[in-house]
């Protein structure tokens, strides 16, 4: 049985490739770092926009995602 103190609900942000971020930047899209869904009409420096897929306010613009380090190695 797992220890209750082991956190399985810890938020681990989604990671994106540089190619995905470049494409999103060109198309004015952002990504939800909770579920990975994309969102249109999103400025490159957008922060905490609403995600229509999961309902969280965790959509960020491509440049903001890059600055936050949510990039796949």
Image (cartoon, rainbow, N blue to C red):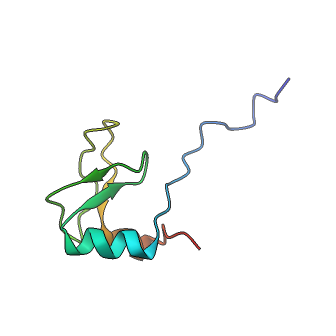
- The quadrant of the image that shows the N terminus is top right
The image shows residue 45, relative to residue 48, as above or below, that is below
Residue at image location 29% in from the left, 72% down from the top: 23
Instruction: Locate residue 62, reporting x and y percent.
Output: 31, 70
Residue at image location 59% in from the left, 74% down from the top: 73
Query: In the visual, does 5 lie left or right of 52?
Result: right
Give the camera-side residue of 23 and 71. 23
Instruction: Locate residue 13, reporting x and y percent.
Output: 50, 54
Instruction: Locate residue 10, reporting x and y percent.
Output: 60, 43
Q: Where on the picture, by quarter, is residue 6?
A: top right
Instruction: Locate residue 64, reporting x and y percent.
Output: 33, 71
Q: Where on the picture, by quarter, is residue 18?
A: bottom left
Residue at image location 48% in from the left, 66% down from the top: 70
Extreme-top residue of the structure: 1
Q: Is residue 63 visible?
A: no
Give the camera-side residue of 69 and 40. 40
Extreme-right residue of the structure: 1
Q: Is residue 20 visible?
A: yes
Query: In the visual, does 39 lie left or right of 54?
Result: left
Residue at image location 49% in from the left, 70% down from the top: 71
């Amino acid at each position: 049985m797992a220890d209750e103190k082991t956190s399985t609900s810890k938020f681990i942000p989604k990671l994106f490739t540089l190619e995905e971020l470049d494409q999103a930047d060109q198309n004015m899209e952002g990504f939800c770092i909770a579920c990975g869904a994309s969102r249109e009409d999103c400025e490159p420096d957008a922060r905490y926009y609403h995600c229509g897929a999961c309902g969280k306010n965790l959509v960020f613009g491509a440049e903001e995602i890059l600055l936050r380090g949510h990039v796949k190695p």
